[in-house]
Amino acid sequence: MAQLPPPEAHDLTAAVQDYAKAIYTLESRDGAASTTDLAALLEVRPASVSGMLRKLSALGLVEHERYRGVRLTERGRRVALEVIRHHRLVELFLVESLGMTWDEVHAEAEVLEHALSEELEELIAEKLGNPTVDPHGDPIPSRELKLAETEAPALAELEPGEAATFVRISDAEPAMLRFLGERGIVPGARLELVERQPFDGPLFVRACGDVHVLGATLARAMHVQREGKR
Amino acid sequence: MAQLPPPEAHDLTAAVQDYAKAIYTLESRDGAASTTDLAALLEVRPASVSGMLRKLSALGLVEHERYRGVRLTERGRRVALEVIRHHRLVELFLVESLGMTWDEVHAEAEVLEHALSEELEELIAEKLGNPTVDPHGDPIPSRELKLAETEAPALAELEPGEAATFVRISDAEPAMLRFLGERGIVPGARLELVERQPFDGPLFVRACGDVHVLGATLARAMHVQREGKR
DNA sequence: TCTACAATTTAGGCATGGCTCAACTTCCGC
DNA sequence: GCGGAAGTTGAGCCATGCCTAAATTGTAGA
């Protein structure tokens, strides 16, 4: 009988950490994580996911009901949040301390998140003043691994005339980030929906003094906090 | 026939990079690297080294003469220097920018050196002003992978009465580093050998205004630049 | 209810990078 | 010049984490 291994992330392989993170993501989005969705997210075959899920289950990180997908255990959730904390701290650090642009940091963080010791994590968090959001507006789990979940509607859900603050966008699409960055549209920016064209058409958005034309896909990726009508 | 893979370090596995670095180290010390010495340095079995050397050879990183150890090819040397540059830049960065102590940075750098992209390497080098030595006094290979080799005798080789500047010590012994750090003895410090006890006994060294008693092992690990007799 | 199809799991392989054990050079000292 | 120690190699094993192909299960529609 093998002892259950300790639950902290740094004892686990990078692959296991990636699975925990992916399951966490899907769980917060859909309530559960299916084999197929995990395979798509991690860009591996479903059969590989099946194999890994058996391993995660043996590690006590997930509950696996055959043919029904998985859910993280409390321990699994801690592992996922630890990795997410690493990822987002690194992203912010690269922007703040090294001047990297916000479209480059995701790929770097994807690697560095697994190479960070707890000591280094703590030094970085201190250096940054224990920040609560990363450069894309995603919340950073606290040292105690509490995550401030925020509900933020997509920009695409606003009605013409509504104003809002841009609060968050996925870090996974460098091209989108570059596009927005070039126009000065970053989290914190005040936006105002001027007009939306029908049939999933582009939005006309006032930001930074100019009116920008943003495609529907982009407008669904951008999340905002409503400020009330004008 | 497989194409020879590209020579740059970031395409190679961490294990291969570690071997290249270890071979480089042994080569500069002994002129060549034997399987047994590599095994000792990397803390694996000689048989495992044999297997990996065949692989390095197939990658074009080493010339392997049976029963004669290996030598790095030009390409292998570049890989080793790239990894060493990463390692030493990271060490200095952790000390300078994050306030980590010099006895902790080796272990961190050992992991991070493999996770660093070329872009990040460059940003760190810039941030540090393209430094030429790491916190332990080891030279940092330049961007073009030129390494300024310096001959520096061990402190143990000084004669009583000689003065010298402490220039370098291995990063691999945290306990030594802590011991010296607590006494303010870091590279750049001016030392003066007061007395040496016979039979490989301790040395009495004046540094930072005090006379310190340093064991023979420590005195062999510390490298100095002579300043002339007093 | 049955059946088709999509989702999932199992079975069997492959590459990496370790390990042990056993056998084989090579070299050095006598 | 020969025997043994040091050094080297090959054969075969293990775990990780991915793959493809083939079975199995669950479910939704006729």
Image (cartoon, coloured by chain):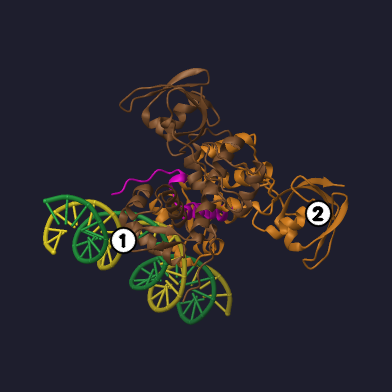
Chain colours: A brown, B orange, C yellow, D green
Looking at the image, residue B151 sits to the left or right of residue B34; the answer is right
- The local secondary structure at tag 2 comes to loop
Q: Residue at x 45, y 55 (%)?
A: A20
* Range shown magenta: B1-28
Q: What amino acid is found at the position of numbered circle 2 in the picture?
A: Arg
- The local secondary structure at tag 1 comes to loop
The one nearer the camera, B163 or B135, is: B135
The location of residue B94, given as percent across then percent down, is 64, 46
Marks 2 and 1 in Cβ contact (< 8 Å): no
The one nearer the camera, B136 or A184, is: A184
Taking the magenta stretch, the answer to whether it contains residue B24 is yes
The subunit carrying tag 1 is A
Q: Residue at x 37, y 45 (%)?
A: B5
Q: What amino acid is found at the position of numbered circle 1 in the picture?
A: Tyr
Looking at the image, residue D22 sits to the left or right of residue C8; the answer is left
The subunit carrying tag 2 is B
In the image, is residue B224 above or below residue C2? above
Taking the magenta stretch, the answer to whether it contains residue B83 is no
The location of residue B86, given as percent across then percent down, is 56, 45
Label 2 CA crowd tier, 10 Å (few <14, some 14–19, many 20+): few
- Give the residue pinned by disc 2: B183
Residue A115: numbered disc: none
Label 1 CA crowd tier, 10 Å (few <14, some 14–19, many 20+): few
Whether residue B24 is visible to the viewer of this picture, yes or no, is: no
The location of residue A1, given as percent across then percent down, is 46, 77
- How far apart, in angstroms, are the residues tagged by discs 2 and 1? 63 Å
Q: Residue at x 42, y 47 (%)?
A: A29
- Give the residue pinned by disc 1: A67
